[in-house]
Every structure is written in structure tokens, then in C-alpha cells.
């Protein structure tokens, strides 16, 4: 029975991830169709290996590939960032000086004596002859219409649409959660102390202590606790905690930066019904998604610093609480953690799905070739300098971008497998180990030192 439950949990996580991928690609697809871009193929899965065609509609062939963990929409008219796709179709881009707005096309550019179609680097929507499906250079084997050159703002919206749909989807999930099961009730625990800043350690804070209030003011979230310490720099603060169900008071004084050297872990203690008008629920949903996004951005912002410190210290493990390269995980970790969450409390999958959707949005906005942010970066250059990135420079950027992306994927896979083997992804095991450590360090009768 337990094996069946685990299988169903994994399938549920795969369904959630697949839904988020489809939502992302639907964003690109719908906005592209709105502006008249061609979308010859909508693929579910990674675009290699065998596939089956499930139908054709809206001048698009819908395919399911053997490797399901991915998705794509072929948009060959999406400007420079799809230049490789265009060239694969037999379309060569003109150099930036090939045409200046207002000039006439040369005979070569207009195609009078040249069968090779061209893309003109202006914002005018100029039809350009495209190769037929029978062309050996057509990687998709789908009939295409003449290409058009679209304005930068339309191309940018198409590139951003996937991220936008992930954000909208996360917001709708939050609205659904508040209207159905209610608002999460968070609890914050001490996740550990740092020897580099031993204020909390010397005060007697232990891992697993539940933080109830600060100076008798109730607190729920880690943001409230951090904000309180920051606003009480070099000022004594009395922390009310619960340890093994027993209330205790601990006094400490944050340093000049408002820090006490304590890591925080926020957990969900349940849900409370939201009895508010629908408009207030919509506003509350926006606030909660914004709070979760700020937490993610804060964590992601610390990651490059931690990785750089590791590099400068020749791979030395980071200090306690400092993120490092070993904390970069991928789809395997997401599935495994999501599986455990689904088995323990399925309702937490609402928040988990919101976090994954926003994570996809944030990561896709990074200015990295092959990501939406990379596409937008090329467009920003084109908008500022009134010409696209040079062919050679563009090719080198994309080539090295893909190589670095492959290296990152390899690191992520190693991290996922290592964490899985070492049990670092097992939520139940981590909770059990934490409880055992607390019992060893703190018998139920132990008083605060």
C-alpha cells in the first residue's frame, strides 16, 4: 500500500510539473498567435527523440515527445534569439547595415535574383518567402507561410508571455487555496545557530525551538522576526519560545546590524477560513504571492555570494546557514520533496505549486541564452542600439551560454543524486533526526541554562 501511495505521489508531482510547463508554453503560444507569429509546432516534452502527432489546429502541429519533462513552441519569427531556427529553415538574416528604415531594398535583399529569403532588421512587418515543408533544411517538416518581421515590443511580449503566465497561474492557485481550504497559519522555528555570530548560541537557542513572540508581541513568519531584530539593533529583546511543548523566555541583544546568528525555518501549522469579500481575497492573494516571491528572491540573491565564497576558498564547504553550489537542485529533488509533501499533507501542495511556478518565472527571466531572459536581453540591446547583436557575437554568446547551461545541468544532476543517496531530500528522515538530536541535547526535564 505504501509503495502504491509513493507511486501515486510521484505521478501527482509529474502532473503538477507538466501543468506548469504547459502553462508556460501556452503563454508563448497564445501571445504569438495573437500577434500573428507562426507557431508551426507545439511540443510537449524535450524536442528530440521519437514523438507522436496528436493533432493540428491553429496552423500548429501538436506533438508529444518521448522525454516528457519539458516543452517548447517553435516560433521561427521571434527575431535574433530564434536566429538558429530561422537558419535551420533556410532563412539568412541580413547584417545590421543591410537596410536602414526608409531605404529601398537592394536586389539581393528583395530576392529579385536570389532564391534565399532574408530577414530585414526593421520594425516593418515585411513578408519574406519561407521554404516549403519539403525542404531538407526544414527541421519540423511543417508547411510555413512567408516570414514577417515584427516590432521589438511584440517580440518582447511573446518572449515574456511564458513567465507572465507562470505568475498569473501562481496567483490563481493562491486565490483558489484561500477560497477553498483557507489561509495558511505559519509557525517559525530556530533552524540552527552560527558560531560566526554566537549571540543566539550563547543565549541558549537550540534547533527546533518554536518562536512564539518577541517582547510579548506574537510573531508568525520569519520576515516578522527578522524585521523586529533589524528594528532593535543593539537593544535587548526577550524571545518567547516553546521547547518540547514547554514555554520559555530567552533574552538576547542583536548586534549593530540587527542580527543574532540564528537560522529560521517556517512551517505550516494548518489553515484558517478566510471570511472576506472576494475583492479582499484577491488583494490578499496578491500580497501573499508577493511575500513568497520576496522570500525566494532573498534566498536566490544569497546563492551567488555563497558559491563565489566557495570558489575563492577552493571548494571549502560554506559556513552554517550560507548557501553553496550543493544547494542548487533540479527536477529530481522537486519531485522527491513534492512526493513527501503530498504523502504528509496534500494541502501543502498548493503552496508548493505556487513556489515552483514563481521559481520557473524568476529563473526564466535570468539573462542567460536559451532562457526567456536571454531573449529579452538580445532585444534590449537591439532596442538601445537600433540594431541586433552581430552574427558572430550572437553565435558565440549562444554557444557559450548553452555550454554553461549543460555544465549547470550536470552539477544539478549530481547534487540531486547525492542528496537523494544521503537522505538530505527525505523530509521525514530530517524531522526524525532533528527530534533525536533535540532529545540528546535537551531531555524533556532540561531547563534553560
Image (cartoon, helix red, strand yellow):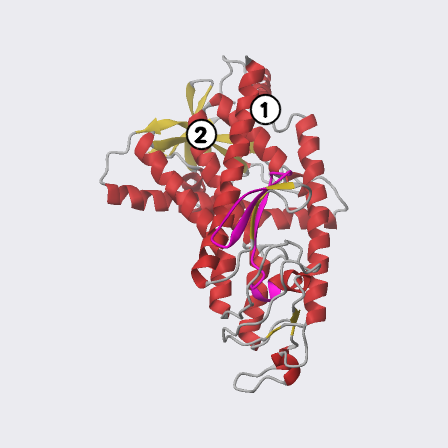
Q: Position of residue 268 (x, y in %)?
A: 43, 29
Q: CA distance from mark 1 to mark 2?
A: 18 Å
Toward which corner of the image does residue 128 lie, by quadrant? bottom right
Residue 167: which numbered mark, if any?
none
Q: Position of residue 90 (x, y in %)?
A: 67, 65
Most foreground residue, 321 or 400: 400
Q: Residue at x 67, y 43 (%)?
A: 325
Looking at this view, name the residue that lies furthest to the front. Answer: 134
> Mark 2 Cα within 10 Å, few/some/many (few <14, many 20+)?
some
SS of the residue under disc 1 = helix
Q: Residue at x 34, y 43 (%)?
A: 285
| 306 on left or right of 354 | right
| 436 on left or right of 23 | right
Looking at this view, name the residue that lies furthest to the right. Answer: 314
Q: Residue at x 54, y 45 (%)?
A: 299
- Which of the two marks, 1 or 2, is nearer to us in this view? 2
Q: Residue at x 59, y 70 (%)?
A: 129
Mark 1 or mark 2, which has the lower sequence index? 2
Residue 6 in view (yes/no): yes
The N terminus, quarter of image: top right
Q: Is residue 37 above or below residue 216?
A: below
Most foreground residue, 323 or 43: 43
Q: Residue 63 lies in magenta, yes or no?
A: yes
Q: Position of residue 168 (x, y in %)?
A: 41, 48
Q: What residue is disc 1 on? A: 430
Q: What residue is disc 2 on? A: 348
SS of the residue under disc 2 = helix
- Range drawn in magenta: 53-81
Amino acid at each position: 500500500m505504501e509503495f502504491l501511495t509513493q507511486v501515486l505521489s510521484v505521478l501527482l508531482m509529474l502532473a503538477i510539473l507538466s501543468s506548469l510547463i504547459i502553462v508556460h508554453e501556452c503563454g508563448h503560444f497564445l501571445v504569438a498567435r495573437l500577434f500573428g507569429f507562426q507557431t508551426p509546432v507545439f511540443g510537449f516534452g524535450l524536442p528530440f527523440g521519437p514523438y507522436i502527432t496528436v493533432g493540428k489546429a491553429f496552423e500548429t502541429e501538436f506533438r508529444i515527445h518521448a522525454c516528457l519533462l519539458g516543452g517548447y513552441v517553435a516560433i521561427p519569427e521571434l527575431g535574433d534569439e530564434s536566429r538558429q531556427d530561422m537558419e535551420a529553415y533556410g532563412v539568412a538574416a541580413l547584417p545590421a547595415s543591410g537596410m536602414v528604415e526608409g531605404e529601398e531594398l537592394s536586389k539581393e535583399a528583395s530576392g529579385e535574383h536570389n532564391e534565399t529569403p532574408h530577414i530585414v532588421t526593421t520594425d516593418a512587418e515585411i513578408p519574406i518567402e519561407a521554404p516549403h515543408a519539403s525542404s531538407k533544411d526544414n527541421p519540423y517538416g511543417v508547411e510555413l507561410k512567408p516570414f514577417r518581421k515584427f516590432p521589438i515590443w511584440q517580440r518582447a511580449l511573446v518572449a515574456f508571455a511564458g513567465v507572465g503566465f507562470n505568475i498569473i497561474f501562481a496567483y490563481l492557485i493562491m486565490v483558489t487555496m484561500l477560497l477553498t481550504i483557507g489561509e495558511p497559519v505559519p509557525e517559525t522555528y530556530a533552524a540552527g545557530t552560527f558560531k560566526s555570530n554566537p549571540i543566539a548560541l550563547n543565549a541558549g537557542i537550540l534547533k527546533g525551538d518554536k518562536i512564539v513572540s518577541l517582547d510579548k508581541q506574537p510573531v508568525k513568519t520569519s520576515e516578522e522576526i527578522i524585521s523586529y531584530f533589524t528594528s532593535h539593533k543593539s537593544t535587548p529583546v526577550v524571545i518567547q519560545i516553546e521547547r518540547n511543548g514547554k514555554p520559555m523566555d530567552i533574552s538576547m541583544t542583536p548586534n549593530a546590524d540587527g542580527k543574532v546568528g540564528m537560522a529560521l525555518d517556517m512551517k505550516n501549522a494548518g489553515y484558517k477560513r478566510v471570511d472576506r469579500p472576494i475583492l479582499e481575497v484577491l488583494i490578499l492573494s496578491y500580497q501573499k504571492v508577493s511575500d513568497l516571491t520576496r522570500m525566494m528572491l532573498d534566498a536566490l540573491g544569497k546563492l551567488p555570494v555563497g558559491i563565489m565564497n566557495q570558489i575563492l576558498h577552493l571548494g571549502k564547504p560554506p559556513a552554517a546557514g550560507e548557501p553553496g553550489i550543493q544547494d542548487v537542485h533540479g527536477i529530481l529533488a522537486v519531485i522527491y520533496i513534492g512526493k513527501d509533501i503530498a504523502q504528509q499533507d496534500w494541502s501543502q501542495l498548493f503552496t508548493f505549486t505556487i513556489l515552483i511556478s514563481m521559481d520557473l518565472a524568476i529563473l526564466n527571466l535570468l539573462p542567460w541564452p536559451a532562457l526567456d531572459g536571454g531573449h529579452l536581453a538580445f532585444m534590449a540591446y537591439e532596442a538601445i542600439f537600433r540594431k541586433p547583436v552581430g552574427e558572430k557575437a550572437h553565435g558565440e554568446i549562444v554557444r557559450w551560454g548553452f555550454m554553461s547551461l549543460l555544465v549547470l545541468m550536470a552539477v544539478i544532476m549530481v547534487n540531486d543524486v547525492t542528496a537523494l543517496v544521503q537522505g538530505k531530500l527525505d523530509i521525514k528522515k530530517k524531522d526524525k533526526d532533528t527530534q533525536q538530536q533535540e532529545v540528546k541535547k535537551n531531555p524533556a526535564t532540561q531547563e534553560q541554562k
